[in-house]
Image (cartoon, rainbow, N blue to C red):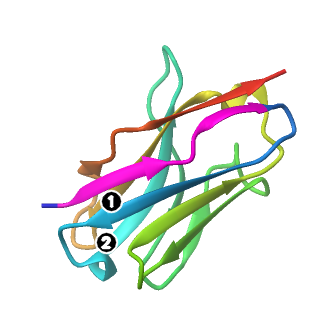
Amino acid sequence: QVQLAESGGGLVQSGGSLRLSCVFWGRDFSAYIMGWFRQAPGKERELLAQITPGRSTNYADSVKGRFTISRDNAKTTVNLQMNSLKPDDTAVYYCGARAMIRSEYDNWGQGTQVTVSS
């Protein structure tokens, strides 16, 4: 089964940067689309960015131009570089994986807290 583990969250000032990483294991990484999500208190989980095995990407409008998703297929990791952070970016960030034959994400990491102070 797929296992995911995020790291890299923390506290940062508004305008700062953080880099999140997610390690994938248990299945063939090259068969999975990887995504980063976040969930703020009282809000639904939001897809921020996703990347295919061929490294095609797409982003939510809320993070476009500030966040960059990347993957290292050899290391089976996916990263999220977050720049120009705002207090509204405060949330628990989750790594997700979905097999290319599936239409929904069904594998999740435990989440990592990102807090942006004003």
**Secondary structure type for disc 1:** strand
| Mark 1 lies on residue | 97
Kindly identify the residue that appears in the image at 36 percent across and 51 percent down.
Answer: 5
Q: Give the mark nearer the N terminus: 1 vs 2.
A: 2
**Secondary structure type for disc 2:** strand
- In the foreground, 47 or 12: 12
Task: Residue 96: give x, y in percent of width and height.
Answer: 36, 53
Taking the magenta stretch, the answer to whether it contains residue 35 is: no
Residue lying farthest to the left in this orientation: 1
Task: Check disc 1: other Cα within 10 Å, few if <14, some if 14-19, many if 20+.
Answer: many
61 displayed left or right of 103? right
Task: Residue 22: give x, y in percent of width and height.
Answer: 44, 58
Q: Which residues are magenta?
A: 2-12
Identity, as a three-letter code, of the amino acid under mark 2:
Tyr
- In the foreground, 89 or 111: 111
Taking the magenta stretch, the answer to whether it contains residue 7 is: yes
Task: Check disc 2: other Cα within 10 Å, few if <14, some if 14-19, many if 20+.
Answer: many
Task: Residue 18: give x, y in percent of width and height.
Answer: 70, 48
Answer yes or no: is residue 104 visible.
no
- Label 1 – label 2 distance at C-alpha: 6 Å
Compared with 97, 33 (above or below) is below
The image quadrant that residue 80 belongs to is bottom right
**Dominant secondary structure of the residues highlighted in magenta in the image:** strand
Which image quadrant: the N terminus? bottom left
109 displayed left or right of 99? right
Which image quadrant: the C terminus? top right
Say whether marks 1 and 2 touch (CB < 8 Å): yes
Identity, as a three-letter code, of the amino acid under mark 1:
Ala
Answer yes or no: is residue 55 visible.
yes
| Mark 2 lies on residue | 32
